Image (cartoon, helix red, strand yellow):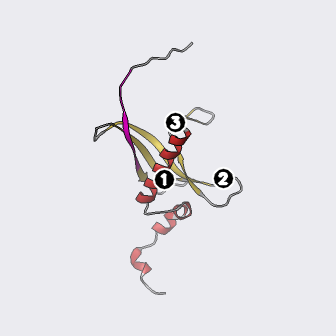
Amino acid sequence: MPTNMEMPLGVTIEKLETKVRLASDRPDDLVAFGELWIYEEGSNEPFCKVKGFTIRIKTFGRADKPKLTVVFPAYPTGKGFLTSFYLPNKSLWEDVTNLFLEEYTQVSGGLSAEEAEGLDERLEIVPDELDKKP
């Protein structure tokens, strides 16, 4: 039977911060990569950084409207993926998800899922050509 090892840390988490980097030229539904920075009370530097979050555009069920989703870090198992960073507190999980989506909105200039889906096509437009009349 596995044993649990413990080490008391006495750490009080003061804040969580997200970092989002846009992904470009991707053939799949991935639009951004994310990191979660965890700060100890009274510190200006994170004591822990969790990498591997992704922001993706997904459509669920019969809904034809795409949605931005945050996928927590996971590793391949041969039959799929297993989440490697898990928050059992549903409220905290939702708060972290919303924090990532808010950061994505700022970094992307306010793109919605529908707008982000066609981003690669819009990036091919030369801004100077937009001012020219047909």
- Mark 1: which amino acid? Leu
Furthest-top residue in view?
1
The residue sitting at 61% across, 58% down in the picture is 66
Point out residue 87 in the picture as x, y percentages from the top left corner: 52, 36
Q: Give the residue type that dot 2 points to.
A: Phe
Q: Is residue 74 left or right of residue 21?
A: right
Residue 29, above or below 10:
below
- Name the image quarter holding the N terminus: top right
Give the mark nearest the N terminus, 3 or 1.
Answer: 3
Percent position of residue 86, x then y: 52, 35
Q: Residue 87, labelled with which disc?
A: 3
Q: Position of residue 123 (x, y in %)?
A: 45, 67
Q: Is residue 129 left or right of residue 93?
A: left
Horizontal side of 7 relative to 113 (left or right) equals left
Is the C-beta separation of discs 3 and 1 under 8 Å?
no
The reply to whether the C-beta atoms of the residues labelled 3 and 2 are less than 8 Å apart is no
Name the side, left or right, on which 47 lies relative to 113. left
How far apart are the two marked residues, 1 and 2, measured between alpha carbons? 18 Å
Q: Give the residue at mark 2.
A: 60
Q: Is residue 82 magenta?
A: no
Of mark 1 and mark 2, the one earlier in the sequence is 2
> Which badge, 3 or 2, comes first in the chain's sequence?
2
Which residues lie in the magenta part? Answer: 8-19
Q: Nearer the viewer, residue 108 or 4?
A: 4
| Other residues around mark 2 within 10 Å, as few (<14) / some (14–19) / many (≥20) | few
Q: Nearer the viewer, mark 1 or mark 2?
A: 1
Question: Mark 3: which secondary structure?
Answer: loop
Is any part of residue 55 visible from this angle? Answer: yes
| Residue type (three-letter) at the residue carrying disc 3 | Leu
* Residues at marks 3 and 2, CA–CA distance in whole angstroms: 22 Å
Which mark is on residue 101?
A: 1
Q: Callout 2: helix, strand or loop?
A: loop
